[in-house]
Image: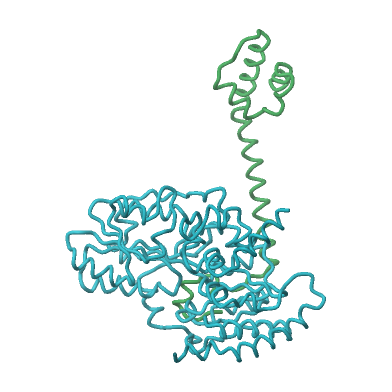
Amino acid sequence: MIEDVRLQALYPFLASKRRDENAIVTMLAESVAGKAAHHVSIFASFFTTHGEDVAAAARTIAGTYRKGGRCDVAIYHILWDLMHTLLANDRARLADEAAE
Amino acid sequence: MQYVDEFRDPEKAASLLRAIEELTRTLAAGRDRPLHIMEVCGGHTHSIFRYGISNMLPPEIEFVHGPGCPVCVLPMGRVDDCVAIAETQGVIFTTFGDAMRVPGSKKSLLQAKADGADVRMVYSPLDALALARANPEREVVFFGLGFETTMPSTAFTVLRAESEGLTNFSLFCNHITIIPTIKAILDSPDLHLDGFLGPGHVSMVIGTRVYDFIAKHYKRPLVVAGFEPLDVLHSVWLVLKQIAEGRCEIENQYGRIVPQDGNPAALDAIAQVFELREFFEWRGLGSIDHSGVRMRDAYARFDAERKFAMPSLQIADPKSCQCGEVLKGVIKPWQCKVYGSACTPQMPLGALMVSSEGACAAYYQYGDLEGLRDKRAADAA
C-alpha cells in the first residue's frame, strides 16, 4: 500500500485495503435481494393504489375497440406500457381479460 | 554526445539482441501466441519505430501500443471546448504545437486560428503567463494537457500567476493520470499482456512504488524504461528475464532519471493545485474513474472551465476512424480502414495520426508503408 498522502490523493484505489471477497459476495447478494423486494413492493403498491383505474381504462379500451373506434391516447399509452406484449394479438379479447 | 551516444552503441545493441533471442527461444516453446509487451508511453512507441526496434526483435515478441499519448486520447468534445474558448472575443488561446492539429467535430484549433481566433503555440505554460503579463486587457488561456509528467509545470505556473496577482490568466485543465488507465487495461478481458515497459517521464514525477499493484495483484512484470534504443532493448530483456524466471516485479531500468519516490517538489505542486475528477472521458477507452484532475476551489479564479461557457458535449469519433481499437491494442494501425489513405499526418482524421507519439503517426513515419499495404491486402483477401 502507498504511504505517500500525495500519491494516495492522486490514486485512491492504491490506498484502499483489499476487501474480503466473501464479504463482497454477501453484500452483493443482500443488495440484489433488497432491490428485488423493492421492485415487487412497487408493483404491489401500484396495483393496490391504481388497480381499479387500470381495470376501468382497460374496459374503456375494450369497449372502444368493439365498436371499431379509437380510444383516448393517454389511456391507451398507459395500458400499452403495461400490457404491450399481451396486446399484440387479439386486442379486444386481451383487454377484456385484463379488465377482469 | 554524452548520455546519448552511450545508449545507441551498435555493439551493445547486438549483444542485447542476442540475449533477447536466447530468452525468446526458451519462452516461445509451447506458446500458441506471441509474447505481448505493452509500451505504455507514447515516447516509447516513437522510439520503437524511430530506431526500428520492433523489426530487430524476434517475431515471437509483439509490442502492444498503450494509451500513453495524451494528445491521442483527448476526446473530440474537449477539442470543441477549446475551439469555443478560443473563439470567445478577447481571448488569446495558448497550447502546445501537437494539440493544434487534433480534429474536433467541426474544426481543429489550427482551423479556428485560420478562421480568425487568436490561437498561439507555446513551448511552456510560462510562455502563456508572459503573454498574460504583456496583454493585461486580454484573457490568456492555457490548454493544459498531458499526464503526470506535465502536471507539475502547469501547477507551478498557476502558483506563479497567483503570486504575481495576475487576473487575466486561466487554465483549461485536461491533465490525466496514467495509473488508473493501466489498471483499466489490466481489467479489460480483450487484452492478453505478458509484461509492461513502464513510462519513464511519468515515473520521474511519481516514482516507481505506485506500480507495485501490477506485480502484486495482476502478476505482471513492469520495467520502467528509458527512451534510447539500448534502454528499450535492455528493458525488453529485463521483462523477458522476469517471465523466464517466473518473477513478477517492478524494476527500474531508467534509474539515471527516475527516483523510487518520485519528485517531492513536483508532487507537492500537483497536490496543492489539483484534485481528482470523479471520472474523465478518454478517446477509445471511454470513461475511466479518477483518471483526470481539475483545479481545486482555491484556484477557481484561474479555472477556464468556470470562466467560460463551452459545449462540453460527448462527440463520437467518425465511423471510419478506428483510433479506439488501435488505442486498446485490438488492431494495429495499418489495419485501420483509413490508415494512410483518408488519414495521414498531413490530413489526420484520427488523433493517433496527429502527434509524433501516436502509434499511427509512428507507423506512418517510420514503418514500411509498402509492406504494410501488402499485409493489409493479404488480410483482406
Q: Which chain appears green? A: A
Specify whether residue B251 is in view: yes
Query: What shade has chain B been given?
Result: cyan
Given residues B354 and B296, the one toward you in this image is B354
Residue shown at the point (26%, 69%) measured from the top left: B129
Given residues B168 and B346, the one toward you in this image is B346
Determine whether A86 is above or below B365 in the image.
above
- Across and down, in percent, residue B311 comes to 38, 48
Residue found at the far top of this picture: A67
Specify whether residue B279 is in view: no
Answer with left or right where residue B194 lies relative to residue B321.
right
Residue shown at the point (37%, 66%) measured from the top left: B96
- Across and down, in percent, residue B116 comes to 28, 51
The N terminus of chain B: image quadrant: bottom left
- Across and down, in percent, residue B241 comes to 69, 85
Given residues A66 and B312, the one toward you in this image is B312
Given residues B173 and A6, the one toward you in this image is B173
- Label total for image: 0
Determine whether B215 is above or below A60 in the image.
below
Q: Specify the color scheme.
A: by chain
Answer with left or right where residue B61 lies relative to residue B1.
right
Q: What is the quadrant of residue B326 in the picture? A: bottom right
Q: What is the quadrant of residue B271 in the picture? A: bottom left
Residue found at the far front of this picture: B370
Answer with left or right where residue B261 lies relative to residue B168.
right
Determine whether B123 is above or below B99 in the image.
below
- Across and down, in percent, residue B172 comes to 35, 61
Residue shown at the point (48%, 56%) measured from the top left: B348
Answer with left or right where residue B174 lies relative to residue A63.
left
